[in-house]
Amino acid sequence: MGFTDKAKKIIAERQIIKSMTIKNLKEKYVGSSLGILWAIINPLLIMLVIAFVFNSIMKTEIKNTPLFILSALLPWFFFTNSISEATTSMKSNVGVLSQFIMSRETVPLSIAFANFINFLFGFIVILPFFIMFNVSIIKYLPLLFTLMALHFIFTLGICLLFSITNVYFRDLSQILNIGLMFLFWVTPVFYSMEMIPEAYRNLIISANPTACYAVLYRSLLYYGSCGEAYVWLVAVVFALISIISGYALFAKKETEILKYL
C-alpha cells in the first residue's frame, strides 16, 4: 500500500484514533480525582521546585531560571513520554490489534497525540508567564506553532520506529531508559548553548536530534528571537528523516506484528 493510500486509510479511521487518544489520556490519570487537571498542575509545581532549587539553593545567575529551564523541559517531557509509551505499545495493545481490523499505526499515533495534547494543556498554562517575562515573544507565536508541528512529526517518526523495533527486539525498552538519560544530559535543557565550548556547539546541534528543538523552543519562548536559520534547517531535516524512516520500517513490518507478539 502506497503512502497516499495509507494516509487516506488513517484519515478514514480518525474516529478510532480519537477514541484511542482519549483512552490513552484517561489512562494517564486513572484513579486520580483531579484527572486531566494534573497536566496543568504539574508544570506549575515543576516551576516552583525549579525556582526554589536554582534560586534559593544553587544561587544561579540565570535570569528567571524556571522559565529558562521550562522552555526546553516541557518539550522534552512530551518527547520522552511519547516514545517510552510507544515502544511497548504493540505488546500492551495486542488484544485490540487481534480483535479489530485497523491500521497498526493508529496505536503509536494515538499515543503521540495523547502526549501532545497533554503537553499543550501544560504549555497553555505556562505561556502567560513567558509573555509577562518577555512580551516580544507574542510576535513569534506563529513560528512556535510551526516548531510544535515539526517536533510532533519528529516524535511520531521515532514512536513508529521504536514501536515496531520493540516487537522484534524486546530489550529496546530497557536500553531506551539508559539512552534517554544520556540524551537528556547532552541536550541543553538545564544549560544554554553558550555554556558549551564553541567548538562543540554545531556538533551538539547536528548530532543530537533533540538539541535543535530545545534550542528553538528556548529562542522563541525565553529569548524572544526566531532562532538561527541553520538550527531550523536541522530541525526540518530531522523531522523528515524520522517520519520517513519510521513509516518505511513500520509499513514493511506491520503485517508480521501479531506473529511476534
Image: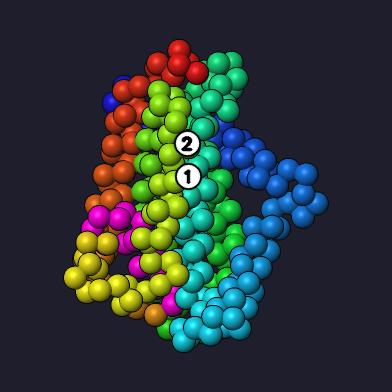
Q: Is residue 32 visible?
A: yes
162 relative position to 125: left or right: left
Please, what is the three-letter code of the amino acid marked with disc 2? Answer: Ser
Q: Is residue 253 above or below residue 132?
A: above
- Cβ–Cβ below 8 Å for labels 2 and 1? yes
Determine the residue positioned at 49% across, 71% down. 69
Q: Image quadrant of residue 30?
A: top right
Which residue, as the protein is rendered here, is positioned at the far top? 259
Q: Position of residue 208 (x, y in %)?
A: 30, 55
Determine whether the residue tagged by mark 1 lies in a helix, strand or loop. Answer: helix
Quadrant of the rendered image containing residue 254:
top left
- Front in this rendered view, residue 183 or 213: 183
Between 127 and 83, which is closer to the camera in this rendering?
83
Give SS at disc 2. Answer: helix
Residue that label 2 marks: 173
Residue at image location 51% in from the left, 69% down from the top: 70
Residue 208 on the magenta segment: yes
Residue in view at x 44 percent, y 31 percent: 171
| Magenta segment | 205-222
133 relative to 46 in the view: left or right? left
Q: Is residue 204 left or right of residue 74?
A: left
Point out residue 19 in the picture as x, y percentages from the top left corner: 61, 35
Percent of width and height locating residue 224: 39, 80
Q: Assess disc 1: are there few (<14), some (14-19) or many (≥20) residues with their C-alpha within 10 Å of its C-alpha.
A: few
